[in-house]
Amino acid sequence: MRVWSHADHPFPLPDGHRYPLSKYRLLRDRIIADGTVRAADVLAPQPISWDALLSVHDGAFLDRVRAGTLGRRETRVLGLPWSPQLVERARRGTQGTLHAARDALDGQRVGLMLGGGTHHAGRASARGYCLFNDLAVVTSVLRAEARAQRVLVVDCDVHQGDGTAELLGPDGGDRDAYTLSVQCERNYPARRIPSDLDIELPAGTAGPEYLRALADGLAVATRAFGTPDLVLYLAGADAWEGDGLGRLALTMDALRERDELVLDHCLALGAPVVVTLAGGYPPDVHDGVRINHQTVLAVRHRADHAAALPPPRPAS
Ligand SMILES: [Zn+2]
């Protein structure tokens, strides 16, 4: 199995900033050290082309991102200080999700980007640590290549996928995308943009209720949308009980069960799955590494048994 990592392309952050920049390198090093993935199979994506970004994002917005002329309010909403390195990393991250999606379509059946899931970025706005929306960009590129047309987003980051809903959700009229977002109801972002299916969970919701709601949501999505050409799964670590921003109460075991539930549901349908890590803000970054490591193991196990999975359907 090969995976994608932009860990060697950090960006400047002020001391004490909540964004877990060090986690991506720690995770990459750990999965190599313990043999989960061979070093040669952890690949660094190049920056995605501006043309690919332009197929989803507003041109004037991209010009400001590129030139470093985002307004003060835009930068505050993004939550990260602008730098050329930040832009390059976001481009590499988006390309990484695209490569991982191709891995899933090309026979690995499950692809993995050790990052990505930047679901708050909208057409003309960077929000909540998300500069570009990798999920929408990947969808756009794969459609242009006729590799995949109908996509299902399963967003299990604890925050609502407002940018993804803006770009792929029902209000935009994209009938070939279905967005399912499972989140804590009293959490960022304050202004929701409706997904095809939003599951709003009360603060303090624990694993059993969460997993029941998620299973129900997957069943509803499948009844409504059938088998997609590709599933984009956001395995957010921030639904963990110890997360600094999450407000839900899932144990690490429950998060592992969540990953297995989503992967097994989608793979049983015959749909390839690309996995992104999305958010996670535990006070100790090593807890974030532990949660993401579980996700890598779940992906590894399924990629190893890809030959035994139901065959994927040709792209619709
Ligand atoms: Zn989040």
Image (cartoon, rainbow, N blue to C red):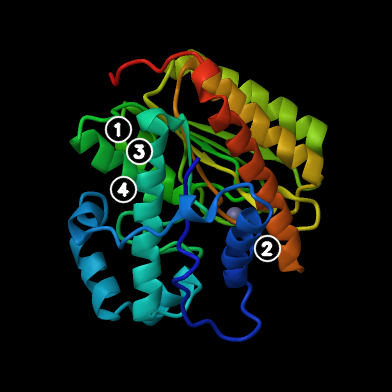
Sequence-earlier tag: 1 or 3: 3
Which residue has dot 4 on it?
137
Task: Identify the element where label 1 is drawn.
Answer: loop
Q: Amino acid at mark 1?
A: Gly
Q: Which mark is residue 102?
A: 3
Q: Which residue is mark 2?
A: 281
Q: Position of residue 89 (x, y in %)?
A: 40, 68
Q: Residue at x 36, y 61 (%)?
A: 92
Tag 4's secondary structure? helix
Q: Quadrant of ligand 1?
A: bottom right
- Sooner in the amino-acid sequence: mark 2 or mark 4: 4
Label 2 – label 1 distance at C-alpha: 33 Å
Percent position (x, y) of residue 248?
76, 48
> Which circle's residue, 4 or 1, is located before the other in the chain?
4
- Residue 63, relative to residue 193: is it above or below? below
**Amino acid type, mark 3:** Arg
- Along the horizontal axis of the image, is 267 left or right of 312? right
Quarter where residue 48 is shown: bottom left
For label 2, being within 8 Å of ligand 1 is answered yes
Residue reaching furthest to the bottom: 15
Q: Nearer the viewer, residue 140 or 315?
A: 315
Front tag of 1 and 3: 3
Decide which of tag 3 and tag 2 comes sooner along the chain: 3
Separation (CA) of disc 2 from disc 4: 25 Å
Q: Residues within 10 Å of mark 4 (few under 14, many from 20)?
A: many
Q: Which residue is mark 1?
A: 173
Q: How far apart are the two marked residues, 1 and 3, measured between alpha carbons?
A: 25 Å
Which numbered disc covers residue 79? none
Spatial distance from mark 3 to mark 2, Cα to Cα?
29 Å
Q: Check disc 3 and report its element: helix, strand or loop.
A: helix
